[in-house]
Image (spheres, rainbow, N blue to C red):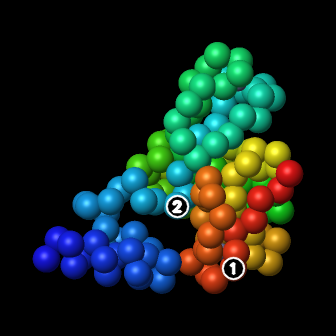
Amino acid sequence: MKIYGLLVAALLMTLVGCAAMDTEAKGDRQDALYACDCGPQCKCNTVGTKPGKCACGAPLKGGHVIKTEGNEALMCTCGPDCQCKLDPNDPTKCGCGKVVKRVDLKGSGVYFCNCGGSCMCNTVSDKPGECKCGMQLKKVD
Ligand SMILES: [Zn+2]
Ligand SMILES: [Zn+2]
Ligand SMILES: [Zn+2]
């Protein structure tokens, strides 16, 4: 049963998202992003899809993408496990009340979806692939 469930999840994950797999495969979320946030004036712009350390020495802060605009990902920094969404009334804030952090994905090596130049697919990856919307993820060097 478990193996069957995993197979189905693997086949359908691009269509149905992660709701059904939350308990089994939390690590398969596609919106987790880690960025340096060494202070309000942080200019490091270190970003990746896995935890790590910035060149400045600070550990990368885990968050998740809530919108993509051009090459910029808007991320909430309340943690990669959080499900909060962009505040519909205030585009500078996340629904959890935190100020949205903008990270430039250009040159980061991160693949991302930006269908239509601005999208809420919130799919990021360290390798090429297809977004749940059907578009190929892209990388900007
Ligand atoms: Zn840094
Ligand atoms: Zn949030
Ligand atoms: Zn997409």
Residue at x 63% of width, y 83% of height: 134
Q: Which residue in the protein does label 2 denote?
A: 30
| Residue 121, position as x, y percentages in the image | 62, 71
Residue at x 59% of width, y 40% of height: 34
Q: With 60 as the anchor, is 117 left or right in this view? A: right
Q: Nearer the viewer, residue 31 or 7?
A: 7
Q: Which residue in the protein does label 1 denote?
A: 135
Please identify the quarter of the rendering in which residue 41 is found: top right
Label 2's element? loop
Q: Nearer the viewer, residue 62 or 93?
A: 62
Are there few (<14), some (14-19), or many (20+) residues within 10 Å of tag 2?
A: many
Amino acid type indicated by mark 2 = Gln
Residue, far left: 1
| Residue 126, position as x, y percentages in the image | 62, 53
Residue, far right: 141
Asked whether the viewer can see residue 92, the reply is no
Label 1's element? loop
Amino acid type indicated by mark 1 = Met
**Residue 75 drawn above or below residue 1:** above
Q: With 44 as the anchor, is 99 left or right in this view? A: left
Query: Residue 70, which numbered label?
Result: none
